[in-house]
Amino acid sequence: MRAALFLTPLALAWAASAVPAVQAETLADALSAAYQSNPTLMQARAQQRRLDETYVQTETQLRPTLSLVGQGSYSHYDSPNINQGSFDTNSGSLGLSASQTLYSGGKTTSDLRAADASVLAGRQSLRASEADILNQVISAYMDVRRDASILDIRKANLEVLRTQLAETTARKDVGQVTPTDVAQARAQYAQAEALLATAEGQLRTSRANYQAVVGEAPQGLAPEPDLPGIPDTLDAAFEAAERANPSLAAAQMTETASRAKVASARNGYGPTLSATASAGYVGPISPLETRNYGGQVSAGLTLTQPLYSGGLIASQVRQALEQNNSDRFGVDKTHRDIIRQVANAWSTMVSAKANRLATQEARDAAKLAYDGVHEEYRAGLRTTLDVLLAEQTLRDTEISLATARHDEYLAKSSLLDAIGALNVQTLGLTVPAYDPKAAFDRVKSAGGTPLDSVAQTLDRVGAVHRAQ
């Protein structure tokens, strides 16, 4: 896998201190791999490029069209007058036909504004998809690290209990302990075997999840670096989310698009003006003799002013207004959801940190207690049950500590996601960031003509700038 590293000083310092004999896979490696190849993310980018084309298609409403038109006909006539008999006629034409919308009553201008806002909303949704994938990678990475630690703890516990069982059995043989002590040690050892099997199964599941999101199996995952960009206060987190949360920005741009659609619907009451022209040749198909063909040229203007649409335009305006009302409520709902998301992520992060610190203290105390109980057991001052309980307490606190570190890290990742800061720039990945604007710019003017600016300027005259 690519050996891309975070560019932040903390990440570089971590990387330098975490290099084993065989180069470990880093979190930056996993994030970079997923960012470049995750199929869900590739699908979202393709969908955004598809959305870009809606703007191009809207632009074509003010562009000229040119067509090659061919036509042929044949007729056979039987006269009721026997003296006239019957006869055949045929004719054909071939020419060019051109049309140009000169003025759409401002409707196309409003549609372009709506299409542009929809493209911008799509970009924000794409940002949200990228953040979701990065969050999934971090979660999968930490799951594997946690479960690998738990498996190591279970293995170490089993070895200690195997030694304890052998020692207890030997002491029973010389009469220093009872068969009950041996039974207690054997029961603890059997339970440790079951817990080890469970830990192995959980690690296999986490590795499979990792491979699904990253695209590669985890190989010796290095310790995770500190996540950059964590706000210092909850108020700072709220402010950051207001500025940069992609879901909120997407909802706002969606409302802008539907507001432009209201204007477009109202523009339906206005007149439209288009020009048409054609040039070609007309003559008999058979026999095909060019001297019998005559040239034909035509041109015209068509002005259309709706007078009565059976209520269609009024209904379209009401429909567009209600869609905009829905989108405005959607912005408010998204805003409230983000406030809740940030508050929950912050609370989870704070409680997870407190839990990790308390668990660290408990683990240190359990280690001291275990060492003391074990020495006292060797001196005959403690029973086998005391040793087993101390061992169990130590392993439980070690597992709790591994879980607490995992939970705190994921809480930080979720907070970055909520404030819109979980991206390749904040994480300092060396992988090039995908630029949806560059993809849009490549197709924005596809099929354009020198008349585009003139046609759009004319059409803006009738555009309704205010939807309400």
Image (cartoon, rainbow, N blue to C red):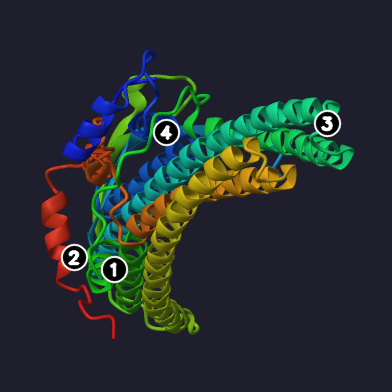
Q: Which mark is residue 107?
A: 1
Q: Secondary structure at mark 1?
A: helix
Disc 2 residue type (three-letter): Asp
Q: Secondary structure at mark 2?
A: helix
Residue picked out by circle 2: 459
The residue mark sitting in front, 2 or 4, is 4
Q: Point out the tag, 2 or 3, that comes first from the N-terminus.
A: 3
Residue picked out by circle 3: 172
For marks 1 and 4, give the CA distance: 42 Å
Point 84% across, 32% down: residue: 175
Point 23% across, 81% down: residue: 466
Residue 29 location, quadrant: top left
- Tell me the quadrant of the picture where the C terminus can be found: bottom left
Along the line of sight, which residue is nearer the eye, 362 or 217?
A: 362
Please give left or right for residue 45 compared with residue 459 in the image. right
The residue mark sitting in front, 3 or 1, is 3
Residue picked out by circle 4: 34
* Marks 2 & 1, CB-CB < 8 Å contact: yes
Please give left or right for residue 63 compared with residue 306 in the image. left
Q: Point out the tag, 4 or 3, that comes first from the N-terminus.
A: 4
For marks 2 and 4, give the CA distance: 45 Å
Please give left or right for residue 146 compared with residue 110 in the image. right
